[in-house]
Image (tube, helix red, strand yellow):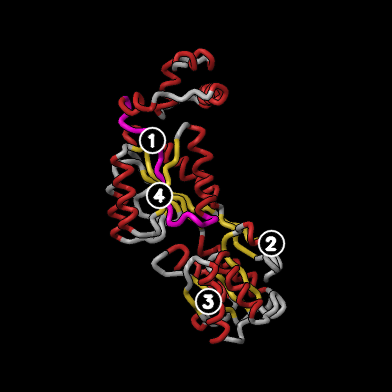
Amino acid sequence: MTLKEVARLANVSASAVSRYFNGGSLSEEKSRAIRAVIEKTGFQPNQLAHTLRTGRVRQVGVIVPRIHSSAVSQVTAGINSVLAREGYLLVIGSAGGDIRQESRYLDMMQSYQMAGVILMATSVTPEKQALYRACSIPLVITGQQFEGLDCVYHDDFHAMRELAACMIRRGRRFIGYIGVSEDDPAVGQLRRQGAQAALREAGLDADAMPIVTASFQMESGHEAMVRLLSEHPELDGVLCATDVIAHGALLALHEAGRRVPDDISIAGIGDDRADRISVPQLSVARLYQTECGRDAAAYLLQRLEAPGRGGPARQSMLGYTIIERGSI
C-alpha cells in the first residue's frame, strides 16, 4: 500500500496524508479519516524515506528516573495514549535521576534524530537547566518547573497541605513526617512545606514536627517509621511524601502494635492500586499522573507543529484530589 492509496481510502489528498505522517498542520476531520484507514489497514510509511525528507524519525524519547514506579508507568501510559495516535513510537531510558545518565540519553536521542524528548525530572539545578536548554530537539519536562522550558507539574504544596489538614481535623496533634531528599524541589521540598503550612494554620508548632528522610522505596519507609516511633512514641499521625513510603510505614506501625487509625493516622501522596487493598485502605492526595503524560505529549506535538518550533515556553500545574479512606 502507498500514501496515494491511503489518501484514496480516506478521501483526502496525498499531500494531506504526507502532512499527517510528517507532523504537519491538518484538520481534525482529515486526521480522523486518515487514522481510521491506518488502523484498518495497518499501513506503515517507509521510515527511511520519512527520515530523509524531514531529518527526524517518528520516535519520541522518554527519560524516566526509574522503571519500577506506579507514577512513572501512569505518566508513560498518558504519553503513549497521545503519541501513538499520531504514529510515534516511544523509546524509554531509565536514568536513575543521574544527570550524567540523562546527558547520555539526551545525546543519543538527538544524534538519532528523534522527534523530541519528554523527561521526568527529579531535581532542579543550574547544571540541569543548562543541559535541557542546550537540547537541539523539542523537550518537555514533567514533575518539576524549569524556567523558560515546556513543563507540566503538580501542585505538590497544596496537595500535602490539604492532606495534613484532613488529619488535623480528625484531632491529630503530634504529627511526624517522612519525606525524601530536598534535592527534589517538588517531592522533597514543596510537600514538606505543605505539611508544615497546615500545622501552622492549625496553631501547631510546625518547626517541631519530627522529620525523617527516606528513599522512594517501601523498605525505606518502613525503616523511617521504625526510627520515628523510637524517637517519638507520642506520635498520633504520620504524613508520607509518597504512598509507597506510606505502605512501608504502615507495616512498621502494624509490627509495633499501633492501631490505624485508632492510635495513629497515616496518609501519603499517590493513589496506586495498593492503596485500595492495604489494611486499612490508605488515605491519599491523588495526583493526575496520566493526565500529566497526556499534557506533556500534547505540548510536544504543539512544539513540533509550531513554525520553527519556537514560541514562549508552555507551562501548566495540575491539580489533585483528596481521597479519605480508612487510615486517617
User: First in sequence: mark 3 or mark 4?
Assistant: 4
Q: Tag 3: residue type?
A: Glu
- On the image, the x and y values in percent for residue 160 come to 55, 66
- On the image, the x and y values in percent for residue 166 come to 64, 69
Work out whether residue 197 can be spotted. Answer: no
Choose mark 1 or mark 3, whichever is in front: 3
**In the image, 327: left or right of 189?**
right
Crowding at dot 1, Cα within 10 Å, few <14 / some 14-19 / many 20+, comes out as some
Which segment did they paint magenta?
53-71
Please give the name of the residue rendered at 39% of the width and 43% of the height, measured from the top-left corner: 61
Callout 3: SS: helix
| Residue beneath disc 1 | 304
User: First in sequence: mark 2 or mark 4?
Assistant: 4
Work out whether residue 260 can be spotted. Answer: yes
C-alpha distance separating marks 3 and 4: 30 Å
Does residue 143 show up magenta in the picture?
Answer: no
Choose between 189 and 221: the one closer to the eye: 221
Whether tag 2 and tag 4 are in contact, CB under 8 A, the answer is no
Task: State the mark number for residue 277.
Answer: 2
| Residue beneath disc 3 | 223
C-alpha distance separating marks 3 and 2: 22 Å
Task: State the mark number for residue 93.
Answer: 4
